Image: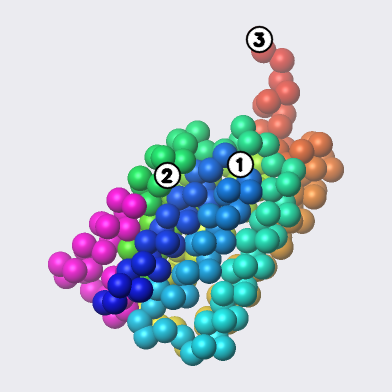
């Protein structure tokens, strides 16, 4: 396990925490960018250079699509837990995953990938389950998909090139679907609020 490998895993975990915990959409998009760009580097051995570059470019594109959606997002719709709590959760889960593989959790890939994947999973579930707008839901889904790719790499080893390419394309497809969902939500509610939540917000107090 090298210093660069651990650094990549730490950046992925912290990026996931920022993506799901930051109130400002731009900050959340930057967190998603960090999480997605460094994810393919949390592997041992690393994918072939063209494959890794494709995965990095796919991560950049997915983060950009989230940023496009986030331009209409309301800062008040951020995680109620706050940035500090999400960063703490990501960091603690990363360390726990790393420690679990060190003491015998069966894994054919690096423990860093397992830890980073668990960190992404831990912080992605709250926005996926309780998102108040399309941007937060989309960010959570992208981080959740990234968690699956990392855990696959951690438990089963570096995936073949075709699987890496499909994974990168899936991240872009999810982000593109969120752009569409955001447009539909803006048409229906005037902002990115999920329709059911928008109705609840506009309901007059009893």
Q: What secondary structure is marked by label 3?
A: loop
Q: Look at the image and tell me in which quarter the C terminus lies.
A: top right
Residue 36, horizontal then vertical, whole percent: 53, 66
Q: Which mark is residue 86?
A: 2
Crowding near the residue tagged with mark 2, few <14, some 14–19, many ≥20 C-alpha atoms within 10 Å? many
> Of circles 2 and 1, which is in front?
1
Query: Residue at the location (63% across, 48% down)?
Result: 26
Looking at the picture, tell me which residue is in the foreground, 39 or 159.
39
Residue position for label 3 = 206
Crowding at dot 1, Cα within 10 Å, few <14 / some 14-19 / many 20+, comes out as some
Closer-to-camera residue (187/49) = 49
Name the residue located 48 percent from the left edge and 69 percent from the top edge.
Answer: 38
In the displayed structure, 192 sits above or below 92; it is above
Q: Is residue 104 magenta?
A: yes
The residues colored magenta run 91-112
The picture places residue 53, in percent across and down from the top left corner, at 57, 81
> Is residue 92 inside the magenta stretch?
yes
On residue 161, the disc is none
Residue 105: image x %, image y %? 21, 69
Which residue is denoted by mark 1 in the rendering? 24
**Relative height, residue 172 to residue 14 (above, below):** below
In-image side of 110 versus 104 (left or right): right
Mark 1 and mark 3: Cα distance apart in space: 31 Å
| Label 2 secondary element | helix
Secondary structure at badge 1 equals loop
Q: Earlier in the sequence, mark 2 or mark 1?
A: 1
């Amino acid at each position: 396990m090298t210093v660069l490998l651990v650094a990549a895993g730490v950046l992925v975990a912290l990026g996931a925490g920022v993506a799901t915990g930051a109130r400002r959409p731009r900050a959340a998009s930057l967190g998603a960018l960090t999480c997605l760009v460094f994810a393919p580097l949390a592997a041992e051995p690393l994918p072939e250079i063209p494959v890794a570059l494709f995965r990095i470019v796919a991560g950049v594109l997915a983060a950009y699509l989230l940023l496009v959606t986030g331009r209409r997002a309301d800062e008040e719709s951020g995680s109620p837990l706050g940035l500090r709590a999400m960063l703490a959760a990501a960091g603690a889960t990363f360390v726990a995953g790393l420690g679990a593989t060190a003491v015998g959790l069966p894994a054919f890939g690096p423990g860093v990938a397992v830890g980073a994947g668990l960190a992404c999973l831990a912080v992605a579930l709250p926005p996926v389950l309780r998102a108040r707008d399309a941007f937060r839901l989309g960010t959570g889904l992208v981080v959740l998909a990234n968690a699956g790719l990392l855990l696959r790499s951690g438990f089963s080893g570096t995936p073949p090139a075709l699987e890496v390419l499909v994974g990168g394309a899936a991240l872009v497809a999810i982000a593109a679907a969120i752009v569409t969902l955001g447009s539909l939500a803006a048409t229906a509610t005037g902002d990115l609020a999920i329709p059911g939540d928008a109705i609840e917000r506009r309901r007059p107090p009893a």
